[in-house]
Amino acid sequence: MYNKKIMKEFMNPKNFGEMNNPDAIGKVGNPVCGDVMELYLRVSKNKKGEEIIKDIKIKTFGCVTAIANASLLTQLAKGKTLEEASKIGKKDLLKKLGDVPSIKVHCSLLAADALQDAIKNYNQNSHKTKKTKK
């Protein structure tokens, strides 16, 4: 039912777990299937002064495809600038995962939503911090 890429990511997921004191958290869920994800970001600046994803962790309660996709997303996003990471889309993930069973496509899209939510959370919190520091 699942291709080798999906099974490889599912059997050996990367960047799973919680993060203490993250800079941002993204939380998403799918009420239809019950899958839930929390994505944690730690942000720092690179040599150019751009904000990058220094560390990323994800907690997933979901099916094989959701777990595989979450693992893949964290690998794609880690080390990227926030702007680059925000451009990682659902189609990119589906393409990287390969042949996803049509009944599982919705599960494979949650990770991208969790990343977008975390980046939004970071930008909102970062903006508040900058305002109060003035």
Image: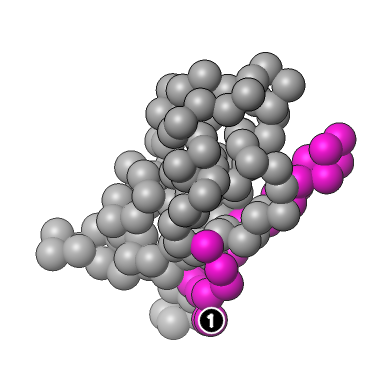
Q: In the image, residue 98 lies at what x, y percent?
A: 46, 23
Q: Residue at position x 31%, y 60% from top?
A: 51
On screen, residue 75 versus residue 18, left or right, reads: left
Q: Please say if 85 is above or below 129.
A: above
Q: Please say if 17 is above or below 8.
A: below
On screen, residue 62 versus residue 59, left or right, reads: right
Q: In the image, residue 19 lies at what x, y percent?
A: 53, 75
Badge 1, how many Cα within 10 Å: few under 14, some, many 20+? few
| Amino acid tagged 1 | Asn
Q: For mark 1, what is the residue?
A: 20
Quarter holding the N terminus is top right
Look at the image and give the residue range highlighted in magenta.
Answer: 16-36
State how many labels appear. 1
On screen, residue 62 versus residue 49, left or right, reads: right
Q: Residue furthest left?
A: 47
Report helix, strand or loop for mark 1. Answer: loop
Q: Residue at position x 42%, y 80% from top?
A: 134
Q: Residue at position x 83%, y 38% from top?
A: 33
Q: In the image, residue 13 lies at what x, y percent?
A: 49, 54
Q: Residue at position x 51%, y 26% from top?
A: 3
Please, what is the dominant secondary structure of the magenta stretch?
loop
One can see residue 121 in this view: no
Colour treatment of the image:
one colour
